[in-house]
Amino acid sequence: MGHTVLDAPLMTKKSMFRAPRLAALAVLAMFAATDASAGLLVANSRSGSIVRFDPVLGSTTTFIAAGLGGLAAPETMAYGPDGHLYVGSGSGANGAILRYDGVTGAFLGRFDQGGSLRAPSAIAFGPDGRLYVASGADDRIVRFDAASGAFVDTFATGNGTDGGLNGPRELRFGPDGALYVATTGSVLGSFDLGLPSNVLRFDLATGASTVFVAMPAPLPSSFGFVSFEGLAFDPSGNGNLWTSDFAGGLRVYSTSPSTPGALQFLADTNYTGTVPSNNFVGDIAFFGGALYAVGFDFTTTDPANLGSILRFGADGAPLPGFGNGTGGLVSLNNPLLSRPISIVAMPSTQVPEPATWALLGLGLAGLGIARRRRAL
């Protein structure tokens, strides 16, 4: 199909000044039309609060205050089929799944009924109408009815052997319907046995598990260990499984039947620039076609474990925010982030794609140009 080129009139000085301003306003209007509830929620395991991060404005606000509904040491969150937010609360024997309004953050009550949870570390709603919860401190995966919260059964239990459910850290259902589990290699909270950190794949029908990804080599900038932390399937449909490593690694693996578990990409998120790295990395989540990760600098003391948010493109390239030149940082040492571990995207039907961030930058630049020219 051909293109027709029309003769354009000469641009006057006034229209030349107006053009960038109009373009900028058009872009900003597009962002204003974006769903106001869109954003990312980050759980602070140390301060006990859950905050909302706006990727467009770069702002961070409190979404759920520490202690609301008994919230304590949250390390996992998930949106349910009902649109509400489910949060794993408690670091000891009295773990619980708390439910909050997914838009306002209002407390709706305790969800799990029966059974027992010790330091819930992961939540995932399954295709079978059940809520799967990793009881991290005693190496179990427990199931509840996703509608009523009633205890169903214990789906899997660790056995303290290589390839077992040792320190379940994250749960994700894959496009194949299987349950993928990140394990740290700990047994009942202890790393004394020196077991590897793996990604396991569970068959829901049989409960049988296999090692999908065996523990890789540590990053040169790490403290010499690997501990799988977060899992996220690429929303583009290519089936790739993205993983985060508490020691700072970001790895992508194939789920193709021809190359299952093959490493596709490896990145080091060492944003502190030290060797060994002073930052650890928590969970990951896709939002607007980009991958977001949370991390924290364990050397900070006031407040402790000051957190940051990082962003990467679908190809793994870092996408730093305005004013952040290091890696993919979009929010560095945020005072509202204290040992952030979990991150989840708020449901939205209008989320800007990565290319739109560039348009926003051009729009803001256009406003600046128009303002400077007016001052001349």
Image: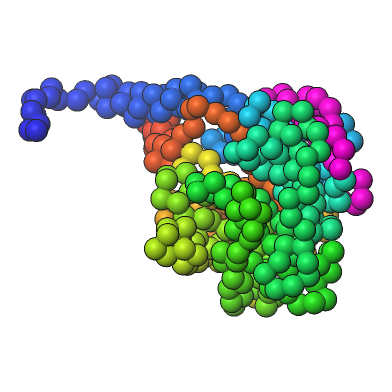
Residue at far front of view: 206
- Per the rendered image, the range of residues in magenta is 91-115
Q: Which quarter of the image is occupied by the C terminus?
A: top left
Q: Residue at x 84, y 64 (%)?
A: 189
Q: Quadrant of residue 77?
A: top right
Residue at far right of view: 93
Nearest to the observer: residue 115 or residue 125: 115
Q: Is residue 282 above or below residue 73?
A: below
Q: Quadrant of residue 11?
A: top left
Q: Residue at x 66, y 25 (%)?
A: 82
Nearest to the observer: residue 299 or residue 254: 254
Look at the magenta stretch and give its main secondary structure: loop
Q: Is residue 49 above or below residue 211?
A: above
The question of residue 234 being in magenta is answered with: no
> Is residue 63 found left or right of 3 in the rendered image?
right
Q: Residue at x 8, y 28 (%)?
A: 4
Is residue 210 visible in the rendered structure shown here? yes
Residue 356 x/y as whole percent = 41, 37
Nearest to the observer: residue 72 or residue 145: 145
Residue 309 x/y as whole percent = 62, 50
Residue 236 x/y as whole percent = 42, 45
Q: Which quarter of the image is occupied by the N terminus?
A: top left
How many discs appear? Answer: 0
> Is residue 18 found left or right of 148 in the rendered image?
left
Q: Is residue 4 above or below residue 235?
A: above
Residue 50 x/y as whole percent = 75, 39
Q: Residue at x 49, y 32 (%)?
A: 351
Is residue 172 visible in the rendered structure shown here? no
> Is residue 370 found left or right of 208 in the rendered image?
left
The question of residue 111 being in magenta is answered with: yes
